[in-house]
Amino acid sequence: MDYRQRQNLEKALAVREEYRKGKSLRQTAREFGISHNWVWGAVRRQNQSVIHAFRQLTDMLDDRAKAELNDKY
């Protein structure tokens, strides 16, 4: 993730936090100078990349565990 992407994601997450506190998403996004639709998209993309990374990690750990079991038996 480059500097610009990280900065944009930080903005989106800040807007999402304000939204969770009860502020309007449109109003909060306007304060940050971005579109509310863009916020949802950025957060959704980030969540998908985190889920993808988690799946890769669990697959890797599963493969390692299978290899260890095969070595033992």
Image (cartoon, grey):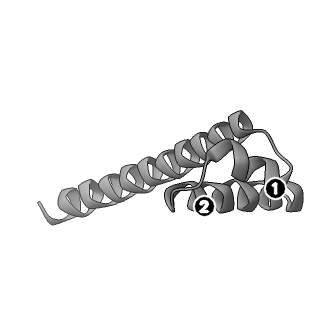
Q: Quadrant of the N terminus?
A: bottom right
Label 1: few (<14), some (14–19) or many (≥20) C-alpha neighbours in 10 Å? some
Q: Earlier in the sequence, mark 1 or mark 2?
A: 2
Mark 2: which secondary structure?
Answer: helix
> From the viewer's perspective, is 51 left or right of 14?
left
Residue denoted by label 2: 18
Closer-to-camera residue (44/34)? 34
**Amino acid of disc 1:** Phe
At a point 82% along the width and 61% down the height, the residue shown is 7
Mark 1: which secondary structure?
Answer: helix
The quarter of the picture where residue 11 lies is: bottom right
At a point 41% along the width and 54% down the height, the residue shown is 60
Label 2: few (<14), some (14–19) or many (≥20) C-alpha neighbours in 10 Å? some
Closer-to-camera residue (56/27)? 27
Q: Is residue 42 above or below residue 18?
A: above
Q: Position of residue 44 (x, y in %)?
A: 57, 40
**Amino acid of disc 2:** Glu
Q: Position of residue 18 (x, y in %)?
A: 60, 61
Q: Quadrant of the C terminus?
A: bottom left
Q: Position of residue 2 (x, y in %)?
A: 84, 58
At a point 86% along the width and 50% down the height, the residue shown is 33
> From the viewer's perspective, is 63 left or right of 25?
left
Residue denoted by label 1: 32
The quarter of the picture where residue 15 lies is: bottom right
